Image (cartoon, helix red, strand yellow):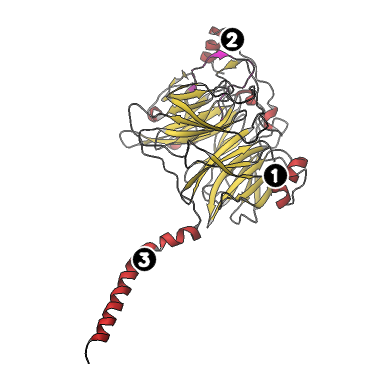
Amino acid sequence: MTTRVALALAAAGLSVVAAPSATAHEGAGDVATNTRGEQVAERGAGVRMSHVANLQYDRSGEAQNGSDIEFVRIDGRDYALAGTLDLGMQIIDITRPTAPRRVAVYDCKVSQGDIQVWKKKNRVLASYTADSTLGEEGAASRCGRDLKLGLDDAGTIIVDLTTPSRPQSVSFLSVPRGSHNMTVHPSGNFLYNSNSDLATSTAPAVTIYDISRPSLPKKVQDYRIPYVPTSLGSESHDITFNASGTRAFVAALSQTLILDTRNPRAPKQIGQIIDPSINVVHQSDPVTLRRKDGSTRSLLVITDERAGAAASVECPGGGLHVYDITGSRVSEPVKIGAWFIDAVRPQEGTTCTSHVLRMYPRQKLMTIAWYSQGVRVIDIRGLATATGSPETVAMGSGIGMREVGHYVFPDSDTWSFKTNRISRNGSFYGYGNDLVRGFDVYRFRGLTNRTVPPLVPQDLGSDHRSTPSGLLAPAAAVVPAVWVALLLHRRGRRRPS
C-alpha cells in the first residue's frame, strides 16, 4: 500500500497487515468472508443509489457464491449471465430490471464461472471457466455429461446461448492448470487463457486457442511471459483487449504486460509494469478518453486485489493504479497516481479490496465491486487531463476520478458489478453478483451536472430470426409493384378488341 493510505489507516488507529498467501487464486476460487444470515439483508446505505431487487440462486439459505457477470440482448430481450462457484451459469431475464426472472440454469458445477460472450455466424456463444478440476459433482453435472469430461478435467466450456432458455453444450478446452479467466479476442476467433497459479509456477504462460470453429477448438501455443518472483506469482490472472484487438493487457499478479496482438496467434510483448505498491495485479483495463480540444488520451487502470481477497481487518484494501499509455508511452507507461474508495475503517475480518470493474468510455463512467464495501460508480472524465505522480494518492476523489454513487449492505461481498444500459442523464440499473447475496439489482440516479451518450446493448439475435424483418423493406417495394402490374393486366383484359 502507498504511504498516504498507510498513514491514513494509522491515523484511524488501524494496523496495516502484511498480505497473506492467497489460496483463493488456486483451485477453489474466492471464498465468501462475510456472514450470511437466515436471509440476505434488505436494507443498506447508499449515495445516489438504491437497491431494487435480489434473486437467490438456490433455497439453501447459505452463501450463493456469485462470481462474474455478463450481459446479452437476444431478439429484443436483455439477459444477465451470472457465474457461480458451484451452482452453474444463471441465465436471468432483465428486460424489466425491477423484476429479474431466471429463465434457465446451465448446469455446470465448476469453480470460478468467468464468462465471455460473442457471436459466431448465427450463434450466440459464451465461455464458462473451471479453475480447478471438475471432481465428481462437476463431471456428473450436465456440462460434464454432455462433453464426456472426467473428474480431473479443468479448463473452459463453450456454451450456445442462441436460445437463452435452452443453453447447449458446444465444446471443451482442456487446460490442465485450469481457467481462472478466459478472454475472447474481439475477432471472436481466439481465446486467451489465464490460469492465475501462484508463485509455485515458475514457467508462466498465456495459453492461446483458435476458436474459429467453436465446436472444434484448437490449441495454438503456450505464450511464455516473464517470471517475476514477487507478490503472489507471475501467471496471468486476467486479460483485457483494446476494442480493435491490437493490444492485450495482461494482469499477471506481480506485473502487467502489454502485448501487440495484431497477429493474435503470435503476440509480442511491448511493455511491462512492475509496481511494488500493487500487492496483487488483478485487472488491467485500458480506456481512451477525448479531451475538449478533440485530442485523445489513453490510460491503463490496474486494480489491486490486495492479499488475493483474503480476510482483512481494515479498509479500503487495494485500490486502482492509473498509468498514462498515450502514444509511445504504451511501451513505457507513466504512473499518475492511485485511487481508493473513501472508506478508511476497521472491519471484522471480511474482504475489503477492489475487484471486478467495467469501463464505459463514451459515458466516461466506471463501475466496480469492492467486496464487503459493496458497489461503486466512478466518474472518470477527469482522467483525460489529470496530472500526478507515482506518489499521488486520492481517496474518493482525485487524479481525475470521482466517486458519484455507492451502495453497501451489512452482508455485501460483491464480486462483480456492471451494467448493460446507461441513460442520457447517466442513470442506470446496475447488476451485482455477490458471493453471499447472489444477484442484486441497483438503481443509480444519474449525474447532476452533465449528460452522456446513451449506452444501448447490441441485439445478437440469430440471423435466421432476424431474416423475416430484414425482408420487410424489399417486400414493401415489391408488393405495390405486383399490385400495379395485376391491375394493369386486369384493365388490359377489359379493353375491347
Is residue 331 shown above or below 464? above
Q: Which quadrant: the C terminus?
A: bottom left
Q: Earlier in the sequence, mark 3 or mark 2?
A: 2
Q: Residues within 10 Å of mark 1 (few under 14, many from 20)?
A: many
Q: Do we see residue 302 in this rendering?
A: yes
Q: Which residue is the extreme one toward the left?
A: 496
Q: Secondary structure at mark 2?
A: loop
Residue 277 at x, y percent in the picture: 57, 21
Classed neighbour count for the residue bearing mark 2: other residues with Cα under 10 Å, few (<14), some (14–19), many (≥20): some
Residue type of the residue flagged with mark 3? Pro
- State the image quarter where residue 178 is shown: top right
- From the image, tell me which residue sits under label 3: 474
- Mark 3 or mark 1, which is nearer the start of the sequence? 1
Q: Quadrant of residue 224?
A: top right
Give the residue type that dot 2 points to.
Leu
Q: Which residue is mark 2?
A: 14
Residue pictured at 64% horizontal, 22% vertical = 35
Q: Which residue is mark 1?
A: 175
The quarter of the image holding the N terminus is top right
Q: Is 468 displayed left or right of 417 in the figure?
A: left
Q: 401 or 68: which is nearer to us?
A: 68
Q: Is residue 204 visible?
A: no
User: The residue under label 1 is which amino acid type?
Assistant: Val
Residue segment shown in magenta: 338-357
Pointers 3 and 2 in contact (C-beta within 8 Å)? no
Of badges 2 and 1, the one in the foreground is: 2
Q: Position of residue 274 (x, y in %)?
A: 57, 28
